Amino acid sequence: MSTITAPMGGKILDVRVNVGDAINEGDEIIIVEAMKMELPIAAVASGTVKEVKVKKGDTVEADAVLLVLE
């Protein structure tokens, strides 16, 4: 099991995956707005989405867990 974390704090603009989705390394899964820029978060590993910890509109801190993969 692995987690995907936020590289910096910001606001969640879009979550592009749902629980049960199969994703591949490099897929854009979440878009974060930080410092007035859109920052796409890519999967660091392939797997199946076990849990999505954020939703559109949430504010997150740096290193917050966004997604859990299995």
Image (cartoon, rainbow, N blue to C red):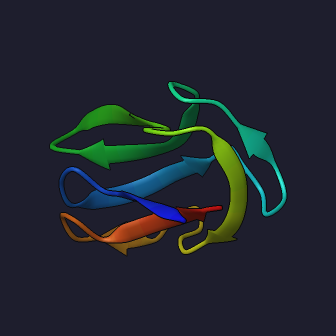
Q: Nearer the viewer, residue 1 or 65?
A: 1
Q: Is residue 37 above or below residue 63?
A: above
Q: Closest to the observer: 51 or 54?
A: 51
Q: Quadrant of residue 41?
A: top left
Q: Say above or below: 40 vs 47.
A: above
Q: Residue at x 70, y 68 (%)?
A: 50
Residue with the most extreme right position: 20
Left/right placement of residue 36 relative to residue 48 reads: left
Give the residue at x 46% y 64%: 66
Q: Nearer the viewer, residue 65 or 56?
A: 65
State the residue at coordinates (22%, 65%): 63
Residue 30: x and y, percent?
Answer: 52, 45
The quarter in which the N terminus is drawn is bottom right
Residue found farthest to the top: 26
Residue 39, image x, y percentages = 33, 34
Q: Quadrant of residue 23?
A: top right
**Percent position of residue 7, x then y:** 22, 50
The one nearer the camera, 64 or 3, is: 3
* Picture layout, residue 6 above or below residue 42: below
Left or right of 25? Residue 23 is: right
2 with respect to 34 (left or right): right
Q: Quadrant of residue 53?
A: bottom right
Count all numbered tags in the image, as a single digit. 0
Q: Quadrant of the C terminus?
A: bottom right
